[in-house]
Image (tube, rainbow, N blue to C red):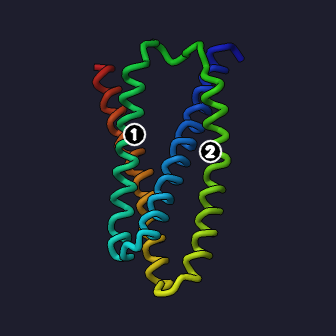
């Protein structure tokens, strides 16, 4: 295997780690917003509607900022970039591996805490949780589909 093929494989793995790391951060932030809203005493009806919207906005803003940063900083041409970002790769891999379990643990601890609180209907809690996780998965897929369509059109424009 030559150097270009190794670099191509490393960049593909980097892409997976990059997306997983950023997604883990966004997932954590969405849960923090949920915990904060819940502690502020917002009604579950409001949270059920607002959490998917907030999640989608966070994913869209993050995607826009990343694309803007990539557009400004990428002055290299060709697929085989010679300088591989090892530190960023390691940091994002650690984030991707550790932040989701931490988020799930915090969510479990919060659920234990909230079930002891009075005036909480379990079905309301589960509805908000369901809408929030649905919003996360919908946002992930929507961003992926939109980016795929956008870059396929860009590729077709470049080829013509």
Residue appearing at x 38%, y 31% in the figure? 67
Callout 1 crowding tier (Cα within 10 Å): few <14, some 14–19, many ≥20 = some
> What residue is rendered at 42% in x and 25% in y?
70
Which residue: 57% across, 42% down? 21
Vertically, is 93 above or below 59? above
* Residue displayed at 36% across by 53% down: 56
Look at the numbered disc 2 and give the secondary structure of its residue.
Answer: helix
Quarter-of-image position of residue 14: top right
| Residue 110, image x, y percentages | 58, 70
Residue at the far front in the pictured view? 40
Q: How many labels does the image show?
A: 2
User: Is residue 96 depicted above or below 154 in this figure?
Assistant: below
* Label 2 or label 1, whichever comes before in sequence order: 1
Residue 51 coordinates in the image, percent (x, y) = 38, 63
Query: Which mark is drawn over residue 130?
Result: none
**Residue bearing the label numbered 1:** 63
Quarter holding the N terminus is top right
């Amino acid at each position: 295997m030559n150097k270009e093929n190794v670099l191509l494989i490393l960049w593909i793995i980097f892409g997976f780690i990059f997306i997983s790391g950023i997604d883990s951060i966004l997932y954590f932030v969405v849960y923090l917003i949920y915990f904060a809203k819940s502690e502020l005493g917002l009604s579950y009806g409001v949270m059920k509607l607002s959490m998917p919207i907030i999640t989608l906005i966070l994913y869209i803003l993050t995607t826009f900022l990343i694309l803007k940063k990539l557009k400004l900083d990428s002055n290299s041409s060709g697929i085989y970039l010679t300088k591989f970002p090892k530190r960023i790769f390691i940091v994002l891999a650690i984030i991707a591996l550790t932040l989701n379990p931490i988020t799930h643990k915090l969510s479990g601890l919060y659920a234990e805490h909230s079930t002891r609180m009075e005036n909480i209907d379990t079905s309301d809690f589960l509805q908000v949780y369901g809408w929030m996780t649905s919003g996360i998965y919908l946002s992930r897929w929507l961003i992926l589909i939109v980016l795929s369509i956008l870059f396929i059109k860009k590729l077709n424009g470049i080829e013509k």
